[in-house]
Image (cartoon, rainbow, N blue to C red):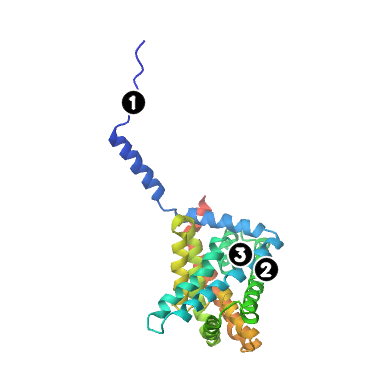
Amino acid sequence: MAPLIRHHPSEKEFEDAAEEKSVHEAAALSPRMIYEVIRRDGEEELARTKRSLIWSGIAAGMLISLSVLGEAIFRAHLPDVSWRPLLENLGYSLGFLAVIMGRMQLFTENTITTVLPIMQQRTAHSLFCMTRLWTIVLTANVIGAFAAASLFVFTSAIPDETMAAIVVLSEHATGMAASESFWRAIPAGVIVALIVWMLPQADEAAFFLILTFTWLIAAGDFTHIVAGSVEMAVLLLRGELAGMQAIFGFFLPVLAGNIIGGTIIFTLVAWGQVRDDVEEG
C-alpha cells in the first residue's frame, strides 16, 4: 500500500490565503447589502411594542441632552478665541454617541430606517406602521428632552458657568427665523441618514464615524429636532421663549427640514441606487 503523502502548504500559499482573507474582510458591502441590513433593522423597529418604543424614545431624548451639556462645558472652560467653536462642537457628538451606539430610538434615525422597508412594500398598512412609530418616538424624544431640561433648570445639578453657556447656546439655536431653521435642518437630516447608511460597514470605526459627522452638524450650525428640543425646553422652562415661537418658529420648521433631508432627499436617493437590484432579486 502506497504511503499517504501529506501536503504541507508552502509559505507562499499561507501568504496568499492570508491576503485573500484580508481582502474578503476589507471588502466594502454592496449598496444592496447595506440596504438589506437597514431594511431588516427597520422591520424590527416597526414590530416593536408601543411600550418598548416609548421608553427607548424617552431615554434617547434624555441622553441627547449630553450634546447640549458637552458643548456647554467646552464653551464654559475654553478661552474665547477664533478656534473655540471648532473644538467645543466636539461636545455636541456626546449625546449622539450615547444614543446611537446604545441602540435607542432617535426620531431622525427613523427617517431612513423605517422608510426603506415601505419602499419595497408600499402598502397602506406599512405607511400606517411607519407613521405610528414616528409619532410615538418623536413624542417620547420630546418628553425625554423636557425631562433633561427640567434637571438643568430646576436643580443645582449643573454648575452656574455651564448653565450660562447652555442658555447662550439655546438662544442661538432657537433664535433663527423659521425659514432659516427649516433650511438648516435639511443638511442635518441628510447627515444623520448618512450615518445610519454607513454604520453597517463601520465596525470598529463606528465611534469615529458618529463623532465626525455629528460634529459636522454642530460645526455647520445645522439644526436637529431632538437635540434642539432640549435647548427649546430650557428656554421655555426659564420663561425666556414664548410657546408659539417655540412651536412655529423652531419646532415645526426644524421637524419638516429633518424629514425632508433624511427621507425625501437621502432615503429616496439611497433607494434609487438599489431599486433595480432589489426588484430583480
Query: Residue 249, located in which quarter of the rendered image?
Result: bottom right
- What residue is at 54 percent from the left and 85 percent from the top? 164
Are dots 3 and 1 in contact, CB under 8 Å? no
**Residue beneath label 3, please?**
105
Amino acid at dot 1: His
| Residue 259 visible somewhere in the drawing | no
Mark 2 in CB contact with mark 3 (< 8 angstroms): no
Q: Which mark is residue 7?
A: 1
Query: Could you say which is closer to the camera, residue 186 or residue 232?
Result: 232
* Disc marking residue 239: none
Earlier residue among tags 2 and 3:
3
Query: Which SS class for mark 1?
Result: loop
Q: Mark 3: which secondary structure? A: loop
Which one is in front, 84 or 278?
84
Alpha-carbon span between mark 1 and mark 2: 62 Å
Query: Where residue 56 sits: x, y (%)?
Result: 64, 64
- At 35% from the left and 23% from the top, the residue drawn is 6
Q: Amino acid at mark 3?
A: Gln
Mark 3 → mark 1, Cα distance in angstroms: 54 Å
User: From this viewpoint, which residue is outermost toward the top?
Assistant: 1
Q: Looking at the picture, does residue 77 appear above or below residue 28?
A: below
Viewer-nearest residue: 197 or 92: 92
Q: Quadrant of residue 247?
A: bottom right
Figure quadrant of residue 12: top left
Give the residue type at disc 2.
Ile
Give the left or right position of residue 50, taking residue 45 as reference.
right
Foreground tag (1 vs 2): 1
Question: How far apart, in angstroms, are the residues tagged by discs 2 and 3?
Answer: 10 Å
* Left or right, 42 with reference to 73: right
The residue pinned by badge 2 equals 136
Local secondary structure at mark 2: helix
